[in-house]
Amino acid sequence: MTTRASADSTREIPEATVARLPIYLRALTALAESSIVTCSSEELATAAGVNSAKLRKDLSYLGSYGTRGVGYDVDYLRYQIARQIGVTQDWPVIIVGIGNLGHALANYSGFRSRGFRVVALLDTDPSRQTEVVAGVDVRPFRDMEAIVRQHGVAIGVIATPAAAAQEVADRMVAAGIGSILNFAPTVLSVPPGVDVRKVDLSIELQILAYHEQRKAPQEQSV
């Protein structure tokens, strides 16, 4: 028997589970693109790179979407997860800082396919403000507040040098942006109610270096 509970009636979802939901969504999308209609928890767990017990526990926070002996309906579960994390709607996003990283982010096609629309690229450098990246004009940073109001922007991406990041974050918060994705190598101070996710590529590389060092044969002391 299949029970498809409403996401509105589910319990509060732990942050660790929230962090894995996009991974499950990506795995389900790949399965759907391979014309797979149903999958077991073991198959989905393998595709997502987690163990099946953890996956079943995570999905239990959303409700019960599986059918005993059959598994999960791939398209339906994909929709439910997308709805739960809020990507069934179109989220307008701005990117501040159009250097090399900002260019790469602006050109990333995955934003659009996952429910995010870059509505503006902003930079303080006048020489950047003549550029068009991925079909979007680079505009002066001073225009940010008007852009946020015009498009109802709730998510901002910071791709500036570290020294400028806090000022950008302060302006974003004052303009009404409630969620920030920070690529600058610095810790931001924001008021309660504002969510910040930090992406630091150098830290990820250092973690990999640690693991590589652990794999190397240890020199024997004499």
Image: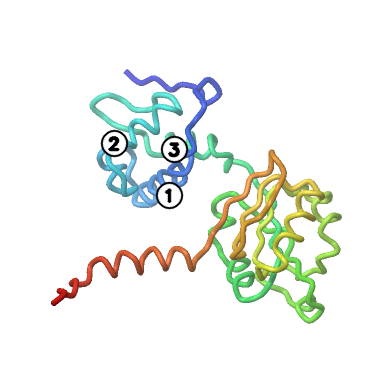
The N terminus appears in which quarter of the rendering? top left
Name the residue type under label 3: Thr
Residue 208 or 83: which is nearer the viewer? 208
Q: Which mark is residue 26?
A: 1
Residue 25 or 127: which is nearer the viewer? 127
Along the horizontal axis of the image, is 79 left or right of 74? right
Name the residue type under label 1: Arg
Give residue 207's position: percent from left, percent from top: 39, 63
Q: Residue at x 74, y 77 (%)?
A: 131
Residue 177 or 186: which is nearer the viewer? 186
User: Does 33 sit above or below residue 44?
Assistant: below
Q: Residues within 10 Å of mark 2 (few under 14, many from 20)?
A: many
The C terminus appears in which quarter of the rendering? bottom left
What distance separates the C-alpha of mark 2 from that of mark 3?
16 Å
Give the quadrant of residue 212.
Answer: bottom left
Give the quadrant of residue 3.
Answer: top left
Residue at numbered disc 2: 41
Along the horizontal axis of the image, is 212 left or right of 140? left
Give residue 4's position: percent from left, percent from top: 43, 22
Q: Which mark is residue 115?
A: none
What distance separates the C-alpha of mark 1 from that of mark 2?
15 Å
Residue 127 or 178: which is nearer the viewer? 178
Q: Which mark is residue 17?
A: 3
Give residue 134's position: percent from left, percent from top: 65, 70
Mark 3 or mark 1: whose residue is earlier in sequence: 3
Give residue 17's position: percent from left, percent from top: 44, 37
Q: Residue at x 41, y 67 (%)?
A: 206
